[in-house]
């Protein structure tokens, strides 16, 4: 299916290098126009519209996802024209993949969906000690995403089907050894250089400072001395710990709960079994399935006739290669660890018994129960702390469910104060000073939540000092806040920031002096190369900077190889200036086995990304994609191709 893409190798290599260079520099880190009408069409895919409102909703979801992963990210980065356009492009790609999945008749079976959901950590955490899924908490998990369990499962099924579109391409994508070596040799080429640096700090003593200079600098750069908008707030938190702290538990309730849950508290019975598997997939033709069943019947007869031979029969005949080498031994397992038919049969056997033929999606099993491990029964006193914690949590969850609506309604209905709500629900009115719109890096607590901060600094909350709506900052945690004092961003008075102005002025002037002297030396040395007073020769490359700034390494690598040796000036900004003499090109050293393998692995990943992007580009042509929203000027053509 992808031969046409692979045949266009020159195009693909060009696209690959667009990926390779930034990806290697970052060491492999995975790393619009406004439409007033929300119904405005911003793109079309196969004739189907993508509206402004759909774009806005998708971008908000993307922002929420990124903020959850990187809480301290600057919100301005997420709302830039480039970030918004990237979301639109991703939305288009998602539509393309869905169309391709439909056209290729890709589906996800019930078994695959079940396996995925069982392995999902957020769902696995909802299982109790008995291995059963807590359906109420599962419904709550789905509801937190605005869905029913059925809608959640349908979305996961659809996503798994869509993933198959690129999975085959990515799994089969490869670059030849020659292609890999050629690209890496070119990218990791080295340069023999000599460097002379003029540090801005060395010129600080030469800077003459006058009040007139400082005042002029202050006026010309007033925005650099603007204070950050901030506010003093009061807020209420409704959460489980608050509710748990005020729950009193009668002794009799603890004893009743202990008796009712003794089996669960004791832990699960574990069983050890060995098995012999004869493979027989569900879609196997009836004739082949009958042959597999006949073989299983023969093996069952053999082990029942000579039970002590079970391990040897398993070693020679079981299709479960993982356990066969251990005589079919599966070690101890509890309920929920095996497929249901196998589990039911194993837990129905007595120690030493051999089962009848057990049919599962994997085929036909013969099970020998080899051991049973009963958990010890804990005493009431030993379980008291856990009993108290469990009961308090259960009661607190019920109370939270009852009070959440009251909390949300009350902060809205009595929007000019949080005090009535605090008194009604017996919550502590808390206060905080100097809160800013941007989460504080590394800080914890409910007030560092981006969604809550956005609500606190909304136009209505700032102008009218109204309570925010109840914001869910974490599971079972609602917060409402209200601004008490608001301090807008303002340019601080000169006298207040004079010391800072002086420091910045001296830094800028020092850098200017360093640059001037460096440029003068560069001009002189170009006229008289023999007079160049440079440092000792050293070797630099993209992966070995030799303690040089990135700008120095980049300048050395950009120098025209046909005109070496060459002198190049490098502006280091506030750090000063540098002159680099590029003497010659140095081939990268032969990598050791580990380095070579790491490079090949990374290159293979990048090659796979390039093929995926090329395939998406072909889908855009096939399904006639129209991007109607204006692309930001600083985005290259390749930028919008990221899947």
Image: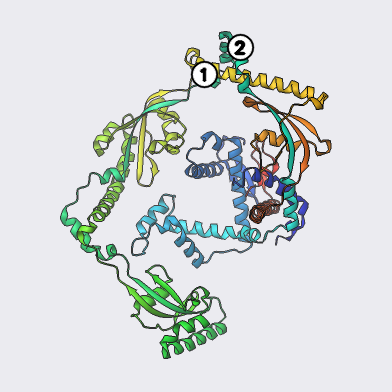
| Between marks 1 and 2 in the image, the one whose residue lies nearer the viewer | 2
Crowding at dot 1, Cα within 10 Å, few <14 / some 14-19 / many 20+, comes out as: some
Task: Looking at this view, name the residue that lies furthest to the bottom.
Answer: 305
Quadrant where the N terminus sits is bottom right
Question: Where residue 512 sits: x, y (%)?
Answer: 66, 20
Q: Can you identify the residue that label 1 sits on?
A: 500
Mark 1 or 2 closer to N-term?
2
Question: Where residue 403 sits: x, y (%)?
Answer: 29, 44
Residue contact between numbered discs 1 and 2, judged by CB atoms under 8 Å: no
Instruction: Name which residue lies at 41% across and 84% down.
Output: 356
366 relative to 375 in the view: left or right: right
Crowding at dot 2, Cα within 10 Å, few <14 / some 14-19 / many 20+, comes out as: few
In what element is the residue under mark 2? loop
Distance, label 1 to label 2, CA atoms, is 16 Å
Mark on residue 598? Answer: none
321 relative to 150 in the view: left or right: right
In what element is the residue under mark 1? helix
- The reply to whether residue 49 is visible in this rendering is no
In the displayed structure, would residue 378 be above or below residue 34? Answer: below
- The reply to whether residue 114 is visible in this rendering is yes
Q: Can you identify the residue that label 2 sits on?
A: 208
6 relative to 271 in the view: left or right: right
In the displayed structure, would residue 227 be above or below residue 158? Answer: above
143 relative to 539 in the view: left or right: left
Question: Where residue 389 sits: x, y (%)?
Answer: 26, 52
* Viewer-side residue, 200 vs 255: 200
* Viewer-side residue, 57 vs 192: 192
Question: Where residue 455 sits: x, y (%)?
Answer: 42, 34
* Viewer-side residue, 368 vs 614: 368
């Amino acid at each position: 299916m992808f031969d046409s893409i692979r045949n266009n190798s020159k195009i693909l290599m060009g696209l690959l290098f667009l990926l390779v260079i930034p990806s290697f520099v970052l060491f492999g880190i995975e790393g619009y126009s406004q439409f007033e009408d929300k119904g405005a069409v911003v793109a079309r895919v196969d004739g189907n519209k993508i509206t402004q409102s759909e774009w806005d909703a998708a971008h908000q979801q993307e922002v929420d996802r990124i903020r959850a992963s990187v809480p301290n990210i600057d919100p301005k980065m997420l709302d830039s024209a480039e970030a918004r356009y990237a979301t639109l492009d991703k939305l288009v790609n998602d539509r393309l993949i869905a169309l391709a999945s439909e056209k290729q008749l890709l589906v996800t079976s019930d078994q695959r969906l079940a396996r995925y959901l069982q392995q999902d950590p957020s769902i696995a955490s909802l299982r109790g000690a008995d291995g059963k899924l807590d359906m109420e908490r599962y419904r709550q998990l789905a509801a937190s995403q605005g869905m029913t369990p059925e809608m959640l499962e349908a979305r996961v099924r659809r996503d798994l089907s869509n993933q198959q579109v690129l999975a085959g391409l990515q799994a089969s994508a490869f670059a030849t050894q020659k292609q890999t070596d050629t690209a890496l040799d070119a990218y990791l080429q080295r340069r023999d250089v000599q460097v002379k640096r003029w540090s801005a700090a060395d010129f600080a003593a030469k800077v003459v400072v006058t009040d007139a200079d400082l005042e002029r600098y202050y006026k010309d750069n007033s925005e650099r001395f603007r204070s950050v908008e901030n506010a003093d707030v009061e807020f209420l938190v409704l959460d489980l710990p608050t509710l748990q702290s005020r729950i009193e538990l009668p002794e009799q309730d603890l004893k009743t709960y202990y008796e009712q849950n003794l089996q669960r508290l004791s832990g699960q019975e574990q069983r050890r079994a060995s098995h012999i598997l004869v493979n027989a997939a569900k879609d196997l033709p009836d004739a082949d399935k009958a042959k597999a069943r006949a073989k299983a019947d023969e093996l069952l007869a053999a082990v029942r006739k000579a039970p002590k031979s079970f391990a040897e029969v398993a070693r020679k005949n079981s299709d479960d290669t993982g356990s066969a080498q251990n005589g079919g031994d599966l070690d101890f397992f509890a309920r929920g660890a095996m497929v249901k038919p196998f589990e039911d049969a194993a837990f129905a056997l007595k120690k030493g018994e051999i089962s009848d033929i057990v049919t599962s999606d994997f085929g036909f099993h013969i099970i020998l129960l080899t051991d049973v491990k009963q958990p010890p029964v804990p005493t009431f006193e030993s379980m008291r702390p856990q009993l108290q914690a469990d009961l308090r949590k259960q009661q607190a969850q019920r109370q939270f469910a009852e009070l959440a609506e009251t909390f949300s309604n009350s902060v809205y209905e009595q929007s000019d104060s949080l005090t009535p709500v605090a008194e009604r629900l017996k919550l502590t009115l808390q206060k905080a000073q100097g809160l800013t719109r941007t989460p504080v890096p590394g800080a914890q607590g409910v007030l560092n939540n981006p969604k809550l901060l956005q609500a606190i600094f909304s136009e209505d909350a700032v102008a009218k000092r109204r309570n925010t709506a109840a914001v869910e900052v974490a599971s079972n945690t609602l917060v409402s806040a209200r601004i008490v004092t608001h301090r807008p961003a303002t340019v601080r008075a000169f006298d207040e920031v004079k010391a800072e102005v002086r420091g910045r002025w001296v830094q800028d002037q020092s850098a200017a002096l360093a640059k001037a002297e460096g440029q003068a030396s560069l001009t002189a040395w170009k006229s008289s190369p023999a007079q160049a007073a440079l440092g000792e020769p050293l070797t630099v490359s993209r992966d070995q900077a030799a303690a040089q700034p990135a700008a120095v390494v980049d300048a050395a690598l950009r120098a025209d190889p046909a005109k070496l040796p060459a002198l190049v000036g490098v502006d280091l900004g506030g750090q000063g200036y540098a002159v680099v003499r590029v003497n010659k090109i140095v081939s990268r050293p032969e990598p050791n086995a580990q380095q070579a393998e790491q490079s090949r692995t990374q290159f293979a990943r990048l090659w796979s990304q390039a093929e995926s992007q090329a395939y998406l580009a072909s889908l855009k042509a096939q399904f006639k994609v129209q991007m109607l929203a204006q692309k930001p000027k600083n985005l290259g053509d390749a930028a919008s191709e990221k899947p």
